[in-house]
Image: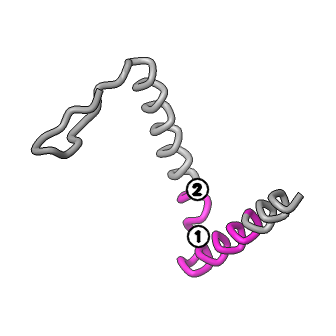
């Protein structure tokens, strides 16, 4: 159920099962982000950006190859 204020969506009421699932996903994301930050803390920002860009390119290439099958 979505609750609106002044015609805009303000919040949603969701079943507890879904809330717990989403909260677990949020916690896992926060933890993995912290681990990644720690793992790359010794690198300069431009080095990290280069690694991320290279990985994104790899994923895009493999997605394009899979779509072309």
Give the structural element (helix, strand or loop) at label 2.
helix
Residue 54 in the image: state x and y as whole percent: 71, 73
Q: How is the image coloured?
A: one colour
Residue 3 in the image: state x and y as whole percent: 21, 32
Q: Quadrant of residue 56?
A: bottom right
Numbered badge on residue 36: 2
The answer to whether marks 1 and 2 mark residues whose Cβ atoms lie closer than 8 Å is no
Of tags 1 and 2, the one toward the viewer is 2
Q: Which residue is outermost to the right?
A: 69
**Residue count near mark 2 (Cα–Cα under 10 Å), binned few <14, some 14–19, many ≥20:** few
Q: Quadrant of residue 11?
A: top left
Residue beneath the point at 84% across and 63% down: 65
- Position of 9 with respect to 51 (left or right) is left
Magenta residues, start to end: 37-59
Residue 52 in the image: state x and y as whole percent: 64, 69
Q: Main secondary structure of the magenta part?
A: helix
Q: Is residue 25 above or below residue 66?
A: above
- Compute the Cα span from label 1 to label 2: 11 Å
Residue beneath the point at 60% across and 73% down: 48
Residue beneath the point at 46% across and 39% down: 26
Q: Quadrant of the N terminus?
A: top left
Residue beneath the point at 48% across and 27% down: 21
**In front of the other: 33 or 57:** 57
**Residue count near mark 1 (Cα–Cα under 10 Å), binned few <14, some 14–19, many ≥20:** few
Is residue 25 one of those drawn in magenta?
Answer: no
Residue 8 in the image: state x and y as whole percent: 19, 46
Give the structural element (helix, strand or loop) at label 1.
loop
Q: Is residue 59 above or below residue 5?
A: below
Q: Which residue is mark 1?
A: 42
Q: Which residue is outermost to the top?
A: 16
């Amino acid at each position: 159920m979505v609750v609106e204020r002044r015609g805009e969506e303000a919040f949603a009421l969701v079943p507890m099962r879904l809330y717990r699932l989403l909260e677990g996903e949020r916690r896992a994301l926060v933890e993995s982000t912290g681990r990644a930050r720690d793992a790359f803390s010794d690198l300069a920002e431009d080095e990290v950006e280069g690694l991320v860009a290279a990985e994104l390119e790899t994923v895009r290439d493999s997605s394009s190859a899979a779509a072309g099958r």
